[in-house]
Image (cartoon, grey):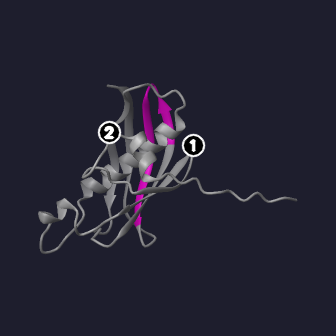
Amino acid sequence: MTTETRVAREIDLNEIKRLIPHRYPMLLIDRVLDYQEGEWLHAIKNVTINEPVFTGHFPDFAIFPGVLILEAMAQATGILGFKTAKDRAEQEMYLFASLDNVKFKKPVIPGDRMHLHVKFIKERRGMWKFYGEARVDGKVVCSADLMCARRKL
């Protein structure tokens, strides 16, 4: 009986930038640690105090905004979508369509490393449904159902 060892499939920042159009300061994925096309993706976002959002949110008690946690999850779904879809057209993007069942469980602060886990649920007529979680130190800090629309611009 043989046991196959699965090798992690990482995606570095340069490939991330080829897959999604986001750039600093809105590129919120630092690296993809592993993924399985059509199934799931595990990425990271390193939260640092020198990010521009912390000058106003909040200067005396820095908290990474929940909407940016959700945006990071959405970017992870876009990367998974583009790695899954083999027929990607020129000028095609995944656009946020909806969020459901969003739950914030704990603040994310500078120095945290968010592990973003997204799972593909289904696709129908260009609409893709995912489930996502953001975790810090193994604990879920945010979870949501995300819908993305695959569209040509």
The residue at which mark 1 appears reads as 37
Residue visible at 27% across and 70% down? 109
**Residue 58 numbered tag:** none
Secondary structure, mark 1, is loop
Q: Which residues are magenta?
A: 121-135
Q: Residues within 10 Å of mark 1 (few under 14, many from 20)?
A: some
Q: CA distance from mark 1 to mark 2?
A: 20 Å
The residue at which mark 2 appears reads as 96
Q: Amino acid at mark 1?
A: Glu
Q: Amino acid at mark 2?
A: Phe
The location of residue 22, given as percent across then percent down, is: 31, 44
Q: Quadrant of the N terminus?
A: bottom right
Residue visible at 60% across and 57% down? 8
For the stretch drawn in magenta, the main secondary structure is: strand
The location of residue 80, given as percent across then percent down, is: 48, 43
Q: Residue furthest front?
A: 14
Q: Residue furthest right?
A: 1
Q: Say above or below: 137 vs 37.
A: below
